Image (spheres, grey):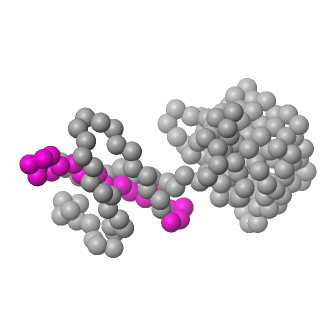
């Protein structure tokens, strides 16, 4: 559309038009990588009148192919990118389904979503390990999780080296009202 001055290379795909009146429409978008995307929506009536273009920012690919994020059916984590994705689902349940070798520096899982102070869901390590966790942070709250509030972390082994300034821990930099059980950590 000319209103937004989009260049052809900025538009990757168009969704097929749907014919609905006063109904919610679900569209599934399958981005190829983990970048953030913008989604532009335009509505038209039967006479060809178009609405203004609405821009929805910060669309991120759903990282979990298994699970629904509930305690009964947690999201399954098999790789580092899925571990990083926890920040987008701060109140969900997760199950570590494979050992993960971190390779390289890690930024603590930090929740910046509206209405959430930190991770408050469940993370079940299922007796798997996270090895080689390396954090060099000049900010407070350094650990696998930056902050956990009312979370349940269990059945996890972590080997880590963490350098930080204030509130440093291997599992979490800050923990309030949380339960950590059957966890074993090594490192410094």
Residue situated in front as seen by the camera: 144 or 168: 144
Q: Quadrant of the N terminus?
A: bottom left
Front one among 149 and 167: 149
Residue 39 visible in the picture: yes
Question: Can residue 118 be seen at all in this image of the molecule?
Answer: no
Quick one: which residue is furthest to the bottom in this view? Answer: 9
The image shows residue 50, relative to residue 104, as above or below, that is above
The residue closer to the viewer here, 15 or 179, is: 15
Q: Which picture quadrant has residue 79?
A: bottom right
Q: Is residue 120 magenta?
A: no
Image location of residue 94, percent across then percent down: 70, 42
Name which residue lies at 39% across and 49% down: 27
Q: Quadrant of residue 2?
A: bottom left
Q: Residue at x 54, y 52 (%)?
A: 62
Q: Quadrant of residue 101?
A: bottom right
- Which residue shows up at 75% across the image and 33% down it? 152
Work out whether residue 46 or residue 117 is closer to the camera in this orientation and state it: 46
The x and y percentages for residue 30 are 47, 59
- Left or right: where does residue 182 sit relative to residue 73? right
Is residue 131 rendered to the left or right of residue 1?
Answer: right
Count the labels in the image. Answer: 0
Q: Residue furthest top?
A: 177
Q: Classify residue 4 as left or right of residue 119.
A: left
Farthest residue to the front: give it.
Answer: 19
148 lies left or right of 99: left
Asked whether 39 falls inside the magenta stretch, the response is yes
Q: Residue at x 72, y 56 (%)?
A: 78
How would you classify the magenta stretch by its main secondary structure? loop
Rendered location of residue 65, percent (x, y) = 61, 52
Residues drawn in magenta: 32-50
């Amino acid at each position: 559309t000319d209103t937004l001055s989009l260049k052809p290379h900025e538009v990757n795909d168009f969704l097929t038009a749907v014919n609905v009146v006063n109904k919610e429409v679900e569209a599934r978008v399958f981005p190829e990588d983990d970048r953030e995307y913008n989604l532009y929506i335009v509505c038209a009536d039967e006479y060809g009148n178009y609405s203004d273009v609405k821009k929805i920012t910060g669309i991120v690919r759903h990282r979990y192919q298994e699970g629904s994020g509930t305690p009964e059916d947690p999201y399954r984590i098999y790789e580092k990118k899925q571990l990083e994705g926890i920040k987008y689902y701060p109140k969900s349940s997760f199950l570590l389904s494979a050992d993960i070798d971190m390779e390289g520096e890690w930024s603590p899982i930090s929740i910046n979503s509206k209405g959430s102070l930190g991770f408050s869901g469940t993370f079940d390590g299922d007796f798997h390990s996270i090895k080689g966790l390396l954090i060099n942070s000049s900010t407070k709250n350094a650990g696998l999780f930056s902050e956990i509030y009312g979370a349940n972390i269990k059945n996890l082994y972590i080997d880590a080296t963490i350098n930080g300034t204030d509130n440093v821990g291997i599992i979490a930099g800050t923990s309030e009202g949380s339960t950590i059980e059957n966890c074993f950590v090594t490192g410094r």
